[in-house]
Structure formats: structure tokens, C-alpha cells
Amino acid sequence: MMMWIDKYIEMISKEDISIEEINNARLFKNQYVPKSLYKYRSINDKSLDNIKNNTIWLSNALDLNDLYDSAVTFDADKLLNEMIRENREYLDGLNLSDTELKRLKSSQDTLNELIDITFEKDPQFLNSDCSQTIRSKISQYFKKDNHEKTSRFVEDTQKSTYICSFAAKFDSINMWSHYANSNKGFCVEYGLDSDHFKNMIFPVKYSGKIFDVTTILKNARRGNTNNLYSYVTAMHKSSDWSYEEEWRIILPIGMNYSSRNIQAPAITAIYLGSRISTENETKIIDIANKSGIECYKMKMSNEQFKLIAEKIN
């Protein structure tokens, strides 16, 4: 599955992406969306209301159990070089000669090159005993300011990203343990026949590296922001989570919703955990019967490490 996800991410990560290219990428992705996806739940008022009203809850990326959810990394030095090299208003204020400007723009370390040029204009700096201290303080100021601005951008993106996670299967022993209150909860099966929900669902790419947004931020500073970057960011997770085989609804920056409860895809079945209480089992079966939803209960296989679903309504 990884290869097509890589291709899809490449398709939507272009700097100047057209509407036609976005549509082609969506059609490419949608052919891999499963017919059904599953959500494991503990039993509480919110989860019961969700199945009663056929809604799903959107969680902020900062509230999810993965500390790195929708987190990114960036090369601060590259961004600083880019900022100095491309900030025309700032450069004009320095009154650099054409030779100095060319020298600055061709340098791989624009900050130190700029300091060198500044010192050369005033020999007292070059001959001063504290020249190295001055150089260090100027460098620290620029790097601190650049890091703070970039970090704020990244944090704002995380704060503005809302997610609802789904799994690719209903019989995962790990998922029942981790997300359904150690088999005391339930799992909802959602059918994805509707193009509307297919368009909202995105795969997760598992990787050993944090997603690097250096190029995206460089393009943003030039005014070439690809607004799909927040989708790409939220699609990346650590390989430690790969057992989840996750798909997710992602609502990024600019998406305005009056409630974090939104309409869900059609519920096609509900699976009860093998350790669910009699009281909670009765509650969910009653909800399922009123809505015409098939209900199953998970049983342990006696022959292998496997959970088996048996119909109970």
C-alpha cells in the first residue's frame, strides 16, 4: 500500500498545483479507499450519541494520543538563508552594492556572509576585541527570531487541524485492546459508497522520520502556498503506529464547522467487544435494532490468536 500513498502525496505536494491536478489526485486516491472502515470506541454518552445520530467527533491534532500527530520538522538554517536572500525590503535597507548583493545571494551561509559584509564596511568591528562576541549575538538574534516565527506557523497548523481516525479492519486484537476499553467497548463499521466521504478520507503514511516542511515554508514565504500541505502533514505518522492501518478524515486550516460533531458515513454494522457488560450490550443492541443495523459480538478463537464475529440480532 505504501507505494501508491507515496505517489498520491507526490501528486498533491506540487508547488503550483492546478484544480485539474487536484481532481486527478482525488480520483487516484479514491480507487484505493476501502468499501468499509471501522472505528473502535469506549462506551460513554458521546460514543452512544454518535451511533444514535450517525455522527462522528472531530478531535484536534494536539488532543490525540500521538504526541507527534500532525507535527513537522524543518531546517531552520535553510529557512534563515532563504529569508535573508529573498527579503527584498530588508536588503534594500542595507544599501548593499551590486557586488555585495551578488556575493550575499550566492553564499551558502547568508547570515555570516551578511555579517562579514557589514563588518568590512566598518573596520572598527574587524579590529575589535569583541568582534566575535558581536558576531555571535547577531547570529543568535536572527536564528532565534526565525525559529520562533517558524515554530509559531507549525503550531498554528497543528491547532487548526481536526481529525477523525478509522481502522482498516474490525478484528484487530491490538485495536480492541487500545481503543475499545480492553474489549469492553464496541466497533462501528461505516460503508464508504458515497463519493462525498471518499473525498474526505485520507490514508496514513507511516515513516521513521518526521515530515519535513522546509520546502513548503520556503514556498509559503514566496507567496506560493499549496493549501493541501496541511492534509499532507496530517497524513504522516511514526512507523510505531503502523499496526493501526489508519485512514482519517482531515479538516485543515480554513475549514469552518459549527460543531465538531459532523455527519458520518452510513453505519453498516456494530461489533461488540468480547468483555462488554450485559447492560452496555443491551443498550447498543437496542440502538442497532431501532436503526436496522446488524450487530455482532466478538469471540475468541480456540485455535489461533484471532477474534471472530458472531451475529447476535
Image: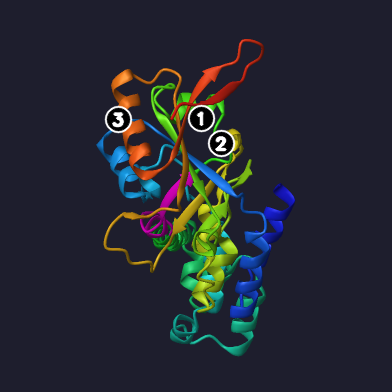
Q: Give the mark, 2 or 1, whose residue is nearer the N terminus.
A: 1
Disc 2: CA contacts within 10 A as few (<14), some (14-19) or many (>=20): some
**Mark 3: few/some/many CA within 10 Å (<14, 14-19, 20+):** few
Q: Gap between marks 2 and 3, in whole Å?
A: 27 Å
Percent position (x, y) of residue 37? 54, 45
Q: Is residue 278 magenta?
A: no
Q: Quadrant of the C terminus?
A: top left
Q: Name the residue carrying label 2.
A: 244
Give residue 202's position: percent from left, percent from top: 55, 55
The three-letter code of the residue at mark 2 reads Glu
Tell me the SS state at disc 2: helix
Q: Pointer 1: what residue? A: 175
On screen, residue 113 versus residue 188, left or right, reads: right
Asked whether the residues under the numbered discs 2 and 1 touch, taking CB atoms below 8 Å apart as contact, a structural biologist would say yes
**Residue type for callout 1:** Met
Q: Quadrant of residue 281?
A: top left
Q: Which residue is mark 3?
A: 283
**Mark-to-mark CA distance, 1 and 3:** 22 Å
SS for dot 1:
helix
Snapshot quadrant of residue 106: bottom right
> Residue at 57% of width from left, 61% of height from top?
214
Which residue is located at x 59 percent, y 83 percent? 101
Residue 157 is situated, as x and y percent measured from the top left of the image, at 41, 59
The residue stretch that appears in magenta: 154-165
Instruction: Indicate the secondary structure of the residue bearing disc 3.
Output: helix
Q: Residue at x 62, y 77 (%)?
A: 105
Residue furthest toward the top? 302
Residue at 54% in and 72% down = 226
The first of marks 2 and 3 along the sequence is 2
